[in-house]
Image (cartoon, rainbow, N blue to C red):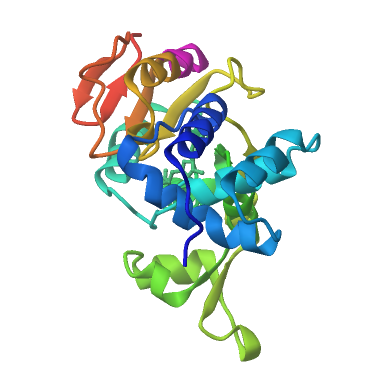
Amino acid sequence: MDIAITTDEFLRFRKLIYDESGISLSDQKQSLVASRLSKRMRELGLMTFTEYYEQVTSDPTREEFVRLLDLISTNKTDFFREAKHFEFLRERILPELAGEKRIRIWSSACSTGEEPYTIAMTLYEGVSDPSQWDFQVLASDLSTRVLAKAAAGVYSEDRFRDVPPDVLRRHFLRGRGEQAGAYKVKPHLAQMIRFRRLNLMNDQFPIQAPLDLVFCRNVMIYFDRPTQGRLVNKFHRYLKPGGYLFIGHSESLQWVEHPFKLLAPTIYQKER
Ligand SMILES: C[S@@+](CC[C@H](N)C(=O)[O-])C[C@H]1O[C@@H](n2cnc3c(N)ncnc32)[C@H](O)[C@@H]1O
């Protein structure tokens, strides 16, 4: 049974979550907040949301706040999710960079890692001699829990249904014995990716610009329009002229002021 949350308590949590993460919860999300946080509150022996709010906001280490955000955010993802983006990367972006053989990509809400590993597999498979290329993928998320899973690079077999078997074999190691049914990323792929915790609400990001491509998929849907606008303008600063931005298939920048050119649905380009 969920612990009851009053509207007043919900509004206080909603503001706290919005101020930190940009995640904008509608009035309809009151019971969702109660159900996602109740278990954690029981673990802590707390009976009311007011007590939990006190605990979260008085913790100088902010550890409990990070946990709270982990529980609120939605982390659904998949290998080769929204496959058109990976085709575009292989067929359009890689040939454009064939001269310099250097590519910098940021997977900016990477969740449990399926997106950056798919990017890395696409890069590796998309060129004739990967050893001649300088590939770097930065993968970041707000949630420490998903980042730990992403960095471990271990997934159960059923997660790979959209990965061709030969591609899976080249880049993931099949577990044996106690690890049967699981696959672990191979070192050549793992070393293409760096994981770190970054909050998209920050004004600046400690990353090496300029980037060729930013993936920001299926997270802006949780942000309100002014927040979306600020974010895509920040991405614009970190991209090189002619660089690309991919957003999720159910997202649009139609109502947001931004300087990008729309190339195809969900694919944007910075002017050259
Ligand atoms: C639904 S997942 C999307 C994963 C992947 N990009 C995809 O499309 O499959 C959304 C992710 O955004 C992250 N997120 C939410 N707010 C964020 C913020 N302010 N900064 C960085 N990441 C955030 C969540 O932790 C979650 O892992």
Residue at x 39%, y 57% (from the top left corner): 79
**Rendering coords of residue 212 (x, y %):** 46, 25
Q: Is residue 156 magenta?
A: no
- Judged left or right of residue 60, residue 25 is left
- Judged left or right of residue 137, residue 128 is left
Q: Quadrant of residue 142?
A: top right
- Judged left or right of residue 81, residue 144 is right
**Rendering coords of residue 41 (x, y %):** 62, 56
Q: Main secondary structure of the magenta part?
A: helix
**Rendering coords of residue 183 (x, y %):** 54, 73
- Bounds of the magenta span? 233-240
Viewer-proximal residue among 220 and 41: 41
Q: How many marks?
A: 0
**Rendering coords of residue 261 (x, y %):** 25, 14
The quadrant the C terminus occupies is top left
Viewer-proximal residue among 62 and 127: 62
Q: Is residue 238 magenta?
A: yes
Residue at x 61%, y 83% (from the top left corner): 179
Residue at x 60%, y 50% (from the top left corner): 48
**Image height of 38 relative to 246, above or below:** below
- Judged left or right of residue 40, residue 227 is left
Residue at x 52%, y 32% (from the top left corner): 12
Q: Residue furthest right?
A: 60
Q: Is residue 185 visible?
A: yes
Q: Is residue 129 visible?
A: no
**Image height of 116 relative to 168, above or below:** above
